[in-house]
Image: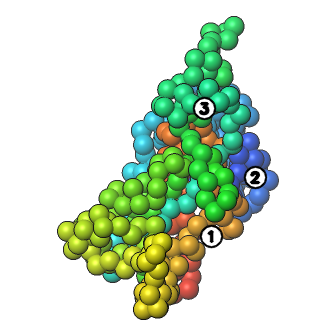
Amino acid sequence: MMFKILILQKYYNLSDEQTEFQINDRTSFKQFLGLKIGDTIPDDAIPQERGQKTIWNFKEQLANKDLSKQLFEMFTIALMDKGIIAKEGSMVDASFVDVPRQRNSKEENADIKKGAVPLEFGKKDKNGKQSKLCQKDTDARWMSKSGEKHFGFKDHINADEKTKLITKYSVTSAAPHDSTEIENIIDETDNRLHADSAYRSKEIEEYLEANKCESFVHEKGYRGNPLTDAQKESNNTKSKIRARVEHIFGFMTNSMNNALYMKSIGMKRIKESIGLLNLTYNLFRLEQLIRLKKVKI
């Protein structure tokens, strides 16, 4: 039941308190959880053991044991065993996962960028707790793209070309270039790869060739050496498949109520949250494929 609660929470992008309220308020939520009117639900308003709350405590356990990634991989393996994911072709891309922006001094940001925790953050309050550090995210990073600033992390995904189901993912801060995670999100089961020009480099092409993965990565032009008409036409053809990966992040943003904005603090919790996000997307995408009779279970 707790796992189902997290799926509901992630799909509707609800806070812990709102999740509890909606379970009490919505009959559809109760039916999904197998509850009847009057049944006891995890009461997130009442402090539990060690002062933690039920839903929050359950998510902390997942994060501490890195279980969301294991759950994601279990589901992916099950889909492959049933032949739903055939891995005839793959698509890779990354999206920013924004978190609440920090208001730090220049000196504090300089320390964070170096990988150090500012001394001010580590100071203890009158109760002996590092209360300021608990509210500061020292793992998130700033990045600008197309004139828009982002603060947070990135969700790097590998998706099945045919079904648009996510098969593998990795999480980084927002700073690294998308292409740096290519070796972490593809494996020997990938035999054809579609990606935009951000993933085009000599090193990546050699890596794909060594792994016997056919490259359909977009070519890119350079100053003094623009794309030829043939290259532009080739990119347009590749885009018909590569663009499908954008639908995944579009679903997360629109249907999942802006799920790519998270309020978790720190890499450990963000990994747990992104793992559940990708798993929740796959669950709903599978339901859609079944409903449209694209696959059979």
Q: Do the numbered discs 1 and 3 sit on residues whose CB atoms are within 8 Å?
A: no
**Image coords of residue 296 (percent x, y):** 44, 82
Q: Are marks 2 and 1 in contact (CB under 8 Å)?
A: no
Residue 259, picture quadrant: bottom right
Q: Amino acid at mark 2?
A: Gln
Return the residue found at the far front. 224
Structural crowding at the residue carrying mark 1, measured as other residues with C-alpha within 10 Å and reported as few (<14), some (14–19) or many (≥20): few
Residue under label 2: 22
| Residue carrying label 1 | 250
Q: Badge 2 local density, few (<14 within 10 Å), some, or many (20+)? A: some
For disc 3, the marked residue is 109
- Estimate the x, y position of residue 18 in percent, counting from the top left: 75, 47
Q: Quick check: can you spot residue 140?
A: yes
Q: Can the viewer see residue 72? A: no
Q: Earlier in the sequence, mark 1 or mark 3?
A: 3
Residue drawn at the location 34% of the way across and 56% of the way down? 184
Q: Front-most of 197 and 53? A: 197
* Element at label 2: helix
Relative to 143, 219 lies left or right: left
> What whole-number distance in Å separates the C-alpha atoms at marks 1 and 3?
32 Å
In the rendered image, residue 19, in percent from the top left (x then y), is placed at 71, 48
Q: Residue furthest right?
A: 25
In the rendered image, residue 244, in percent from the top left (x then y), is placed at 52, 78
Please name which of the two marks, 1 or 3, marks the residue nearer to the observer: 3
The three-letter amino acid code for the residue at tag 3 is Asn
Give the spatial CA distance, label 2 vs label 3. Answer: 39 Å
* Disc 1 residue type (three-letter): Gly
Residue shown at the point (68%, 28%) measured from the top left: 105
Q: Secondary structure at mark 1?
A: helix
Element type where label 3 sits in the image: helix
